[in-house]
Amino acid sequence: MMNRRTLLVTVALTTGIWLAGAPATAQPRAGGTFTFAVATTPPTLDWHTTGARATIVYAGMYIWEGLVAMDEKFVPHPMLAERWDISKDGLTWTFPLRRNVRFHNGKVMTAEDVVASLNRWRQVSARAEMLTRIEEIAATDRHTVVFRLSAPLASLPFILSREGQQPVVHPKEIIENAPVNKLSAYVGTGPYKLVEWVPDRHIVLERFPQYSARDDVRGGLAGRKVAYLDRIVFRSIPESEVRMAGLRTGQFDAAQPLPQEYLGELKKVPGVQPVIVKFDMKPVMYFSMDGPTKNVKLRKALRAALNMDDIMYAATGSQDFYDLNPDQLWFRFQALWSDTGKEIYNQNNAAAAKALAKEAGYKGEPLRFLASATQFHHKRPAIQITEQLKAAGFNVTLDLRDWPTVSQLQRDPSKWDITYTRTVVTVPSEAELVTSMGFKSPETQKLLDTIGTETDIEKLRAAFEAFKRDVIVEQVPWVTMGDMFALRGLRSHVRGLQPIYTHPLWNVWLEK
Amino acid sequence: MTVYVVRRIAAAAGVLLLDVVLIFSLIHFTPGDPARLIVGDERGGSANVDKVREQLGLNRPLPAQFAAYIAGLVRGDMGRSFFSREPVFDMLASRVPLTLALAIISLVIGLAVALPTGVLAAVKRGSIWDQAFMLLAMLGVSMPSFWFATVLMLVFAVALGWFPVVGYATFTDSPGRWLWHLVLPATAIGVAQAALTARMTRASLLEVLRLDYVTLTARAKGLPEWRVILKHALANAAFPIVTIVGMNFAFLLGGVVIIETVFALPGVGSLLINSVARRDYHVIQGVLLFVAAANVMMNLVVDLSYVVIDKRVRYGAAT
């Protein structure tokens, strides 16, 4: 049975959420190869160790599964587990496993494989730091896995199903003692198995005929998965113009991402339909806790100057692709969304910014703004922000570097004062992201602790409201610009594809 | 001659060693951290980044890393990709045939266009042909190759559908499909190369055509004009043409980064650019070393070819 409070959280998170596309009316048919033109190639296929989106959505989620999986509304459901039961004191979680689930190498999955995989994940994954409350993970019999905790942890199913560095299950013999990024084989229980991975060229996946699908229909990465397509090929095509050209000629069945400016052109191409994926990223500005921006008044001054409409337009190039959402954490469709803090969002008030800056004792000290030059959705808004801040009297210099350089320099807060990246919060515990660039305060930590352990949805909501008010509005650890959407091009014979950013290709078929 | 070749090879080895040091230092002094890129978008995971760094040997001091790299090179081991764990040598070996094929086909296309137009422009100097060809050549040199490649793709792949937009088939799978996939990218490169070679051919031929043995001797012998031009003039104008063609070829072996990226061809150039974006140090070093070696080798081949072109050239003599 599911714990009542967890159920409440689940139900609450489910409410008020957008629908996943139009229901498919035609009868699905099996067969065919689906060629998907994508921009990047995975840095590694070792999902335990990476949060790289390419690893997850072009390979990982087809090959592997975890005990728990999230649907498109970010609600966790059992996947390899039959269900989960929580003891009254909240300290013992029992996961009975589904029977006769096979790995791609023919072996039947048992609790031993699950325990070995979870233990390896605890060693190699940074996300496992969220699980310090776990004392032991053990197989009590061939088909049961038990987690013993030192303190209650309501977000356990979220942590187990969060896509980045997900603790997916590998066969024990492959995973035991496998170091980071050095798996001897890529074998999972997923609906597709890996045929070939040629970095920078393609990933070829093939239907796994012995896949045992669940019966419950969910969405996202959860529930019933039927592999209609014989093969899936992710082609790595770095040029967006070329992804578009191949989509036009039918060489590709889908292409994503496409620059948002292509929307109008896509509408005109026969046989192709544009899809706006209404969940992509939140562009976010972080402040260094090292230089002048250590002063919270200066952070407030900088925030007051921003015109989010212009920034989001610069990021996407079209009003169809953003939402001026005042919530600094959640997308509008997420259950914990609220407009708390709307007074500090999109102020566009240079006079207020100047007054606050004066109050902060700012005397034109140079502020270095570090951003990526190699991604247009970083570069263009960064230029826009710089100009807005300059117009409000701040001495900002834009430091554009390539992404690898930016991501390294961000680790050293003495190298920048403001930086720009994109983020997404999908589970409550990820509110911790606000601290990732070195921001810390005792009350923040207290609120984050509450958020991490609270199981009552109303109390959780109250904790988040306090967090938004007392931390985000008052202490300005970050400023999010709004919600950003992505553009996907799809040939019209494709059926059943969910309009979510992970675009799973199971339950998808070709109507040819 | 043998002495000359040996000396040149020894010098080439010295150049390569210097390249290794330069390449290694440049890459390691460029900011960026492969471990961080492997770990991906996850922030707050510095413990994990440290684990990956240790795993990749990036936590060791630079001199130790350099010594390990050199020791590997001596054994013929160029290291492994941080990302795919594939040996760099294998990665290069799988990429070089495509780049080589692309270089040869574009060279053939380039020469087929450049030589006749260059000769015609020189012979008909000042004519409308000369002016038209040289205008086109100017256009070819100054046209950005990514733009020309995109135009070719939009016309011949998207609008007419004669060629595929992207993709690649190996020669052993199907020679026809292999060529079909390479025509557009090779044309994009070949035309730019042709423009330069045609201008060089014209200039160099004009110079020779002014010389006495052409204007007086050959023609006085009553040789037909085509023989005067092809046998007497062009053969003697060949040095600069061969030099530029050789240098172009060496450049092409380094992979035509932009064209390979546009057509998503798995060649040496796209390997380099993707590896730089990932800070995949061993692969970057391997590719650059290969490019340096290709340049040194082509220089040697060009120098030696002078002997074949002109019997008067002698190497290795004390004088």
Image: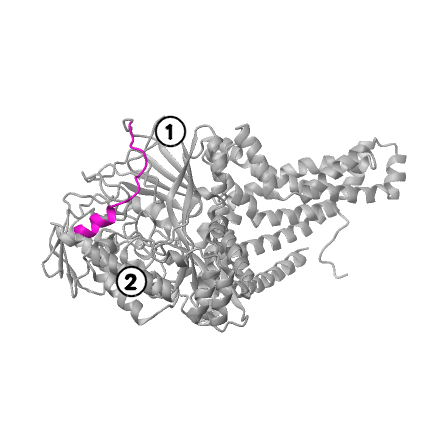
Q: Position of residue B51 (x, y in %)?
A: 34, 64
**In the depicted view, which residue is nearer to us: A134 or A72?**
A72
Q: Position of residue A14 (x, y in %)?
A: 24, 46
Colouring convention used in this rendered image of the protein: one colour
**In the depicted view, which residue is nearer to us: A285 or A443?**
A443
User: What residue sits right under mark 1 in the picture?
Assistant: A493
User: What residue sits right under mark 2 in the picture?
Assistant: A466
Image position of A134 (left or right of A195): left
**In the depicted view, which residue is nearer to us: A217 or A185?**
A217
Q: Residues within 10 Å of mark 1 (few under 14, many from 20)?
A: few
Using the numbered discs, state the Cα–Cα distance from disc 1 to disc 2 in whole angstroms: 48 Å
Image position of A76 (left or right of B275): left
Q: Amino acid at mark 1?
A: His
- Read off the chain for label 1: A
Q: Quarter of the image containing the C terminus of chain A?
A: top left
Taking the spot 67% from the left edge, 35% from the top edge, the residue there is: B112
Query: Is residue B166 something that shows in the picture?
Result: no
Q: Which residues are magenta?
A: A7-25
Q: Residues within 10 Å of mark 2 (few under 14, many from 20)?
A: some
Q: For residue A180, which quarter of the picture?
A: bottom left
Q: For residue A445, which quarter of the picture?
A: bottom left
A2 above or below B79? above
- Read off the chain for label 2: A
Q: Earlier in the sequence, mark 1 or mark 2?
A: 2
Q: Is residue A454 magenta?
A: no
- Eye-nearest disc, 1 or 2: 2
Image position of A207 (left or right of B239): left
**In the depicted view, which residue is nearer to us: B218 or A33?**
A33
